Image (tube, rainbow, N blue to C red):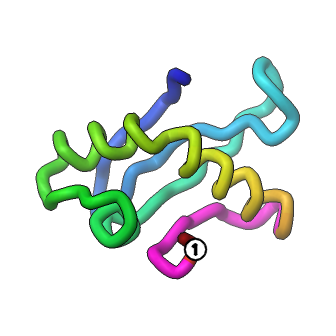
C-alpha cells in the first residue's frame, strides 16, 4: 500500500480515500503518542514514518472507520482509538 504521508508537529498526516481509489481524498492524522503506545514507535521522525508504513493498513482502516462515523469532520487518531 502506498500513501501520501508526512510527519509534522507530533503527528503523521496521511491521505485516505473514503469512496475508493481515484476519488476525493481526506487528510487524516495519527498522533505520535498513538504510534508509540500501540505500534512501538520511538520518538524520531524517521522511525515514526517507518512504523506508520509497517502498520499503514490498520491505521488507514481505523481512519476510514472514524470518517464514516463523522463525515465532514477532521480525522485525528489518538491512543484511545486503538
Tell me which residue sits at (55%, 23%) in the image: 1
Q: State yes or no: residue 74 in magenta.
A: yes
Residue picked out by circle 1: 81
Can you give x and y, in whole percent of width and height, for residue 3 in the image?
A: 51, 28
Q: Position of residue 35 (x, y in %)?
A: 35, 61
Residue depicted at x 66% and y 63%: 74
Is 68 part of what is drawn in magenta? no
Is the C terminus in the top left, top right, bottom left or bottom right quadrant?
Answer: bottom right
Left or right of 47 on screen, residue 57: right
Seen in the picture, residue 62 relative to 52 is either above or below; the reply is: below
Q: Please identify the residue farthest to the bottom as the structure is shown.
A: 80
| Other-residue count near label 1 (Cα within 10 Å), few / some / many at <14 / 14–19 / ≥20 | few
In the image, residue 7 sits, relative to residue 70, either above or below, namely above
Report x, y in % for residue 10.
29, 63
| Disc 1, SS | helix
Image coordinates of residue 25 in percent, x first then y, are 71, 35
**Side of 82 where 74 appears, left or right:** right
Residue range highlighted in magenta: 70-80
Identified at 52% across, 81% down, the residue is 80
Amino acid at each position: 500500500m502506498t500513501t501520501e504521508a508526512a510527519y509534522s508537529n507530533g503527528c503523521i498526516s496521511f491521505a485516505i480515500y473514503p469512496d475508493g481509489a481515484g476519488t476525493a481524498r481526506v487528510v487524516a492524522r495519527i498522533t505520535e503518542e498513538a504510534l508509540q503506545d500501540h505500534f512501538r514507535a520511538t520518538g524520531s521522525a524517521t522511525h515514526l514514518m517507518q512504523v506508520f508504513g509497517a502498520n499503514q493498513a490498520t491505521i488507514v482502516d481505523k481512519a476510514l472507520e472514524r470518517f464514516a462515523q463523522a463525515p465532514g469532520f477532521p480525522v485525528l487518531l489518538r491512543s484511545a482509538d486503538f
